[in-house]
Amino acid sequence: MLDYVISKYNFWIYIILMMIGLYAMIGKKNLVKKLIGMNIFQSAIILFYVSIGVKAGATVPILSGHGHGHEAIEVANYINPLPHVLMLTAIVVSIATTGIALASLILIYRKYNTLEEDEILKIRKETGA
Amino acid sequence: MKVIALIAVIMTGALLIYGVEDMPKWSDPNSPASSHVSPQYIQEATEKTATPNIVTAVLADYRSYDTMGETVVVFTAAIGCILMLRKKRNGEGG
Amino acid sequence: MADQFAALIIVVPLIASLFVPVIGWWKKRLCYPWVVAVLVIPLISSLSVLNTVMTTGKFSYRLGGWAPPWGIEYMLDHLSAFVLVIVSSISLIVAIYSKKSIEDNLPEKTVPFYTLFLLLVTGLMGIVITGDVFNLFVFLEISALSCYALIAIGEEGAPMATFNYIIIGTIGACFYLLGIGYLYIATGSLNMADLANILPDLYHSKVILVAFAFFTVGLAIKAGLFPLHTWLPDAYCTAPSAVSALIAPLMTKVAAYVMIRLLFTVFQPNFSVNMVPVMPILGWLSVMAIFWGGIKALAQTDLKRMLVYVVVAEVGYIVIGVSVANRMGLTGAILHIMNDAVMMACLFLVVGAILYKTGTREIQQLRHLNKKMPFTMAAFTITALSMVGIPPACGFFSKWYLILGTIEAGQWVWAAALLCSSLINAVLFFRVIECAYLKPMEPAYALNGGETKHEEIQRDEAPLTMLVPIVITAAGVILLGIFSGKIISSVIQFAVPASF
Amino acid sequence: MDVLYSSRPLWAVLVSMIAAFLILATGEKNRNIRESWTIMAALAKFLIVFSMVPVILQGKVIEYTIVTFYPGLLLQFRIDAFGMLFGVIASSLWIATSFYSIGYVRGLNEHAQTRYFFAFAMCLSSTIGIAFSANLLTFLVFYEILTIATYPLVIHKESKEGIMGGRKYLAYTLTAGCVLLFAIGMIYYMTGTLDFKAGGFIAGSGSSTVLIMLFAMLIFGFGVKAGIMPMHEWLPTAMVAPTPVSALLHAVAVVKAGVFGCLRVILYVFGPGLLHDLGIWLIMAYIASFTIVVAGFLALGQDHLKRRLAFSTINNLAMIVVGAALLTKSSMTGGIIHMANHAFMKITLFFCAGAIHVKMHKDYVSQLDGLGRQMPLTMGAFAIGAIGLSGIPPMSGFISKWFLCLGALEANQIIFLFVFMTSAMLDVAFFFPIIYNSFFKKPLDDVAPHFDEAPMFMVIPLVITALLSIVFGIVPDAFFRFFSLTSLAVQNIMGVG
């Protein structure tokens, strides 16, 4: 049992992180906290991806033997590069999303002078909008 | 809201944990992820793209279209922020 | 040659969007003609791609020349070519329309608006055309980000609606990303065709099951399927007219397209239909979407808000067609993707034009609109009849196939929901038509003994740039209905998986 | 059966649709040109339809496929004798109504005349489409178009009453449309075809419970338009429409489309044999008989002339349905020929009501005293129509009732004989006082009546239709060959079933 848990510990960690993030996104009243939750959520996924790429006993996928192209390249010596590539893209996407979300938070703050969801709802109800 | 959030989170977590059971062990070199597409990257990338860093080779060559999309995402976000935040220089504390 | 057309579909609007700031910096007025001119090219290209697909069958286009599954490829079959034509034509029509709406409401934001407009279109077409699940995610985010920004500049309450949309939309996108991760961990591939080959051996793996669940939930969020639609009404309603006219017809439909793609191309119908209980769940959720959307729409007094809830119900239509999982139902779903896109475009364009001219969206205040804006209202009426399902407008035919599908599947309640929905639509739209065409008798008239002596009402039609798109879409509603047989026999028939 | 492939059915449908758009384009400013479109289309339509009659009488059918969706699922016209009969009725009476409408709307200086003529032409288009449909899908398509095209006519007055009438009309007919859509989908799923076939095509494709349910749905769907009780509510309220509308649509096109649909279902989808086996023919006949009697009594209570006529319409339509439901040769002949006879007589009556409305602004039965001396032509025509509907020879109504009664005897159901008799009695009871009062009573307002008729545009059509109903009473096969068409249709049905 313990073996099982340890052999997949990367998954447990990312699952916990993701649940924290998801909870914050849905359950928190403060909009910034929601945004932070979103970031945690995305980071958890990124960690998950990166952990897929790991191979026991392998190193970063930068070929040291470059220039002496004669030696055969041993696949097992280098970790899987694809998840890293995907995550470079995903990181950028997550930053961009955060940026847009922050911009919309600025708009909200300008209008309501608060970032608490319930207060905003109250203001909107009062103004009838 | 908190209750809904909790239910959603627990359901998601349960689903994820359920899936873990059939996952390959961590850092298993023979997992499908490491044995289907990626070996060929490692073997061929340097030769075909003349780049020792395989991540760079995949990023900028094999999957360069993704990377283009990535830059477009940044561009989109930038223009989006401009669109949202410009205007109202006068008044309203902006 | 067709290969190059396939590339142009994405590249042209993408590059053009980079030029919009340059052009806008030089002369702001030129943004609009530039965008319109640019959007003609994807339309021509996608028509040519559709033509190629129809004559020679499906083909793929390798980006950078790398062979899949190592590189990324475009997958062009009947389904994607068909949806591409829808996306490109609707976006062109809305681009033509956007002129007055933007000039009047957001003059200082013209440049970023058009940049994002092109990016949104690029994103949508990228989603449709790509044959790589991760690439799809990237374009999904391009479209989503531009959509967020475009919605945020709308009226009162838009920023809040946007923020909600961002949060929920990101959950959807992240679920989709997780699904990709799970698929990748089990298969090692990201290419759709490759996945379709590998997956059948792994159908009993729990990883695949979880991946499938995340895909479905993520896309249901993006498609606005009940009960994950909560972001949709506010976001679509507060967006500027030109924006809601673009996203209401396209965003949810494209998400529905991805759903069909994943359920029936990446996963085989054998898995999606027989091995997981997803179809009944989707079907019942759609039934609820139809009723909930319809009932909420009935409660609205604001025309645009009413339409937004109709969008929620219409998503239910498409998903029902998918979830009956037979040839007739899926034919109806794919046909409805097109029909609904055209109808929604028309309705939202009309609402925008009414708002532009009269400054109101209240249904009760539309009085005499048939005299003021006869063509706009005629277009509205035609589309409304189509929504109710009156032939020969296109809505009838998709409804017909959807009902045939539900009957074949033996899902009587789903069939009843579809039928009820057209009755609800009848109430919704005839209420508007009555208000616009038939003035309620005012005491003054009654005293005249019902004689027809109303004050002269000046015709005050929407400007030509608005009217032409409206008329085109309304004509489309009729023509697509009349030619639906042709469309089905030449395209949709082949877009439905052969195993049905 | 010989099949002749021709695009004439399509043109017969399209001609008034094209006219409708020409009317819309011409608009209010050039009234005369606009009206000439109507008349030209009416004549052209009639000629096209009538030119096909000889072919049909040779026992051929004319076919034209518009579009095929999937195998067995197509839009197609196929004209058989029964469809032809309906087509001839509708297109010939449209000519009369066109002239009459012009007199009517101009006489009253109605508003929104363009919309009126536009919707009218669309209605005719779809009616002919219904008559010529080869299968249930095509039928449904045109049926739904008809529903919507009639709506602007029902709400034409735009008064509160009119709008409410319109709502009621839509509520009934759209619900019916939905039910039909579902039932037709079921039939397609069960049989893989939707083509009408003399004697029915659905037998043996499902359990009897399913078939009975389908029958109920289809009859409900078509029965709404045909005003079979308890689905008749909309028809009297729709009488707020202008009279030519009531005349053509609520006596000929729309309600007859409903009856036509019922008959198609009874004779061409289910077929006499299957209905006999299922045993629902008798239930059907009882329900319709109930409608006959109740509508007759309700008509007695109406003081509004058009409402009285509306209930008489409900009464007569149910008679046609009973004729078909009794499933004997004579009863079918009687029912089908009554479609034609009733159309001519009832349109005469409505025309008269409209003429009185335009000339005297009187709508109520109690106001008609002494009118016969002022408007002898109109009231004379009214008398002919009324006598005919009561089934008194030599009017055409007698012939249909004769066959219906024969049919009741053939079916060994004496009770229906009494129903027909009662109905005839009631007809007499609610029409004859009108005739008597108008000719023999003194006018209410003591002015010495002098000859003062409605506009000629209105009087001539109504005189012609009145005369025709006499002619059809003496020579049932005159001009339009209604009798030959009827017997051919009955032959086809009985030949199989």
Image: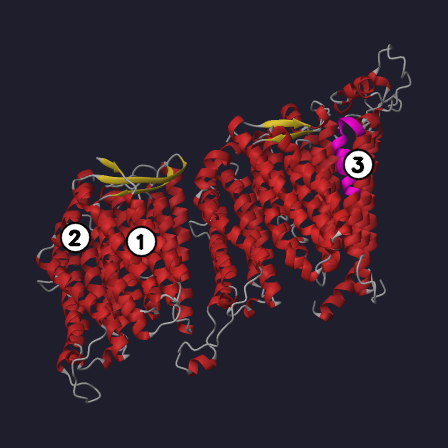
Q: Chain of mark 1?
A: D
Residue C164 seen in the current view = no
Q: Which secondary structure lies at badge 1?
A: helix
Q: So how many labels did they put on this image?
A: 3
Residue visible at 20% across and 48% down in the picture: D327
Examine the residues drawn in magenta and state their main secondary structure: helix
Against C391, is C156 above or below?
Answer: below
Quickly name the residue at label 1. Answer: D127
The x and y percentages for residue A61 are 86, 23
Checking the image for residue D480, the label placed there is 2
Quickly name the residue at label 3. Answer: A89
Q: Write down the quadrant of residue D176 in the picture.
A: bottom left
Mark 2: few/some/many CA within 10 Å (<14, 14-19, 20+): some
Q: Which secondary structure lies at badge 2?
A: helix
Q: CA distance from mark 3 to mark 2?
A: 78 Å
* Furthest-front residue in this view: C26
Query: Which amino acid type is marked by label 3?
Result: Thr
The x and y percentages for residue D344 are 20, 61
Q: Chain of mark 2?
A: D
Q: CA distance from mark 1 to mark 3?
A: 62 Å
The x and y percentages for residue C457 are 50, 72
User: Share a chain, discs 3 and 2?
Assistant: no
Mark 3: few/some/many CA within 10 Å (<14, 14-19, 20+): many
Residue visible at 71% across and 39% down in the picture: C139
Residue visible at 83% across and 54% down in the picture: A32
Q: Which residues are magenta?
A: B60-74
